């Protein structure tokens, strides 16, 4: 099982007036474990009021670059983001789990491809890593980014994008869309909705086959952009998306539904070659929480069905998943589930965390 490791904060700076950039030093002996695929994220844990607080932040560094960088948008009342902005200092240590997540460039990549990206706000972080990695390592690939923000001075990583654009002027297009600033051209103003996607596509991707689309932002933006790209003829498996933050209902992360009338089930987990079993009562909300109640620690971060840190394989039995934003359809078909969203359907369930 992936473990948290203490990583030192090597640098911290204000990215915009409401976001910070944090660099994490990864010691030589942990570099193999922290090697990441562009687009992946890091679960980070701190302690507040004696309780663990876990959040997941996308890596914005280019592939193979150290230290690892993340960008944190400060959310009013956000326990991690306010701590990161106001209290965290260079030299402090954060508990960080090795990279995880299914939104990433493939391990084997072809050169000469045309990628597009749609990012909204802090959704730029994984996409910045994807863009820089493609441009640095695939000499003939190109990228067109469409990046929505309220206004220029809250736009994260704008300097990094300008630097990349200067370095790769022929292969990178960056198109900003600002919703709260008047723009000279209509195409650069407003929100990224279905009409805007169609217009941007017509203007900047006409006559070119788009090989892959990368989308990151809030849920509604992802749904809109995905539907618009499919309408424009892109194949389903060429459109990749990452939702930012756990979807919330009534202010709490969604959880699998507990069933008070249901009998306990026997859950066995296989992890690092070892087996552990426990009984999960019918009232337990999900397998991760039920395991914790029995002293069995399973990996998790968002507990909202988004980050896939809790991904596991059902080797025996059946579970029901409440929400799934973290797994691809092929993974679900092959029996992978998100344990934070799963409750047992059969009396006995065996989960294999070693299967990848
Ligand atoms: S912990 Fe994030 S999807 Fe389960």
Image (spheres, grey):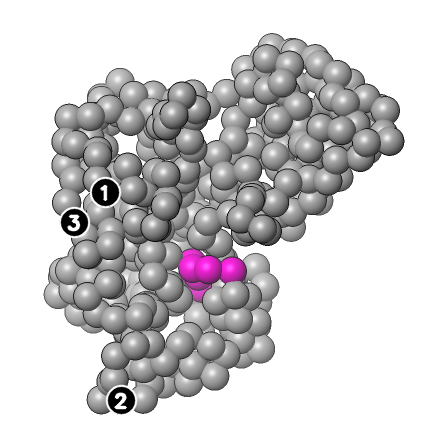
Q: Is residue 339 above or below residue 293?
A: below
Instruction: Identify residue for label 1.
Output: 85
Residue in view at x 33 percent, y 76 percent: 179
> First in sequence: mark 2 or mark 3?
3
* Quarter assignment of residue 151: bottom left
Residue in view at x 24 percent, y 85 percent: 183
Q: Nearer the viewer, residue 146 or 282?
A: 282
SS at circle 1:
helix
Tag 3: Cα neighbours inside 10 Å, few (<14), some, or many (≥20)?
Answer: some
Q: Main secondary structure of the magenta part?
A: strand
SS at circle 2:
loop
Residues at marks 2 and 3, CA–CA distance in whole angstroms: 30 Å
Instruction: Identify residue for label 2.
Output: 185
**The disc label shown at residue 14, or none:** 3
Task: Give yes or no for contact between labels 2 and 3 (Cβ–Cβ under 8 Å).
Answer: no
Q: Is residue 246 above or below residue 147?
A: above
Residues at marks 2 and 1, CA–CA distance in whole angstroms: 35 Å
The reply to whether the residue tagged 1 has its Cβ within 8 angstroms of ligand 1 is no
Task: Judge from the rendering whether residue 156 lies leftward or rightward of residue 98; answer left or right.
Answer: left
């Amino acid at each position: 099982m992936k473990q948290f490791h203490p990583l030192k904060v090597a640098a911290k700076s204000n990215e915009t007036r409401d976001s910070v950039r944090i660099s994490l030093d990864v010691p030589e002996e942990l570099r193999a474990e922290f090697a990441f695929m562009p687009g992946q994220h890091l679960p980070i844990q701190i302690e507040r009021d004696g309780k663990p607080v876990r959040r997941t932040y996308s890596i914005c560094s280019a592939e193979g670059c150290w230290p690892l960088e993340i960008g944190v948008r400060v959310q009013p009342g956000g326990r991690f983001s306010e701590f990161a902005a106001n209290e965290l200092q260079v030299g402090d240590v954060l508990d960080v789990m090795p990279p995880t997540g299914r939104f990433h460039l493939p391990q084997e990549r072809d050169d000469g491809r045309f990628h597009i990206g749609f990012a909204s706000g802090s959704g730029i972080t994984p996409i910045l890593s994807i863009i820089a990695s493609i441009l640095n390592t695939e000499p003939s690939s190109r990228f067109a980014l469409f990046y929505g923000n309220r206004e220029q001075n809250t736009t994260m990583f704008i300097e990094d994008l300008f630097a990349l654009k200067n370095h790769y002027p022929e292969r990178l297009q960056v198109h900003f869309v600002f919703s709260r600033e008047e723009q000279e051209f209509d195409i650069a103003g407003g929100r990224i909705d279905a009409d805007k996607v169609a217009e941007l596509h017509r203007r900047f991707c006409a006559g070119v086959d788009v090989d892959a689309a990368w989308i990151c932002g809030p849920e509604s933006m992802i749904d809109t952009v995905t539907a618009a790209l499919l309408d424009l003829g892109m194949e389903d498996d060429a459109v990749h998306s990452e939702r930012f933050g756990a979807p919330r209902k009534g202010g709490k992360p969604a959880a699998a539904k507990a069933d008070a009338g249901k009998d306990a089930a026997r859950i066995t987990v296989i992890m690092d070659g070892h087996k552990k079993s426990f009984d999960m009562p019918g009232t337990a909300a999900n397998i991760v929480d039920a395991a914790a109640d029995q002293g069995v620690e399973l990996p998790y971060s968002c507990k909202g069905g988004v980050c896939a840190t809790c991904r596991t394989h059902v080797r025996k039995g059946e579970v029901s998943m409440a929400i799934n934003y973290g797994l691809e359809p092929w993974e679900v078909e092959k029996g992978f589930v998100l344990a934070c969203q799963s409750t047992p359907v059969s009396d006995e369930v065996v989960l294999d965390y070693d299967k990848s």
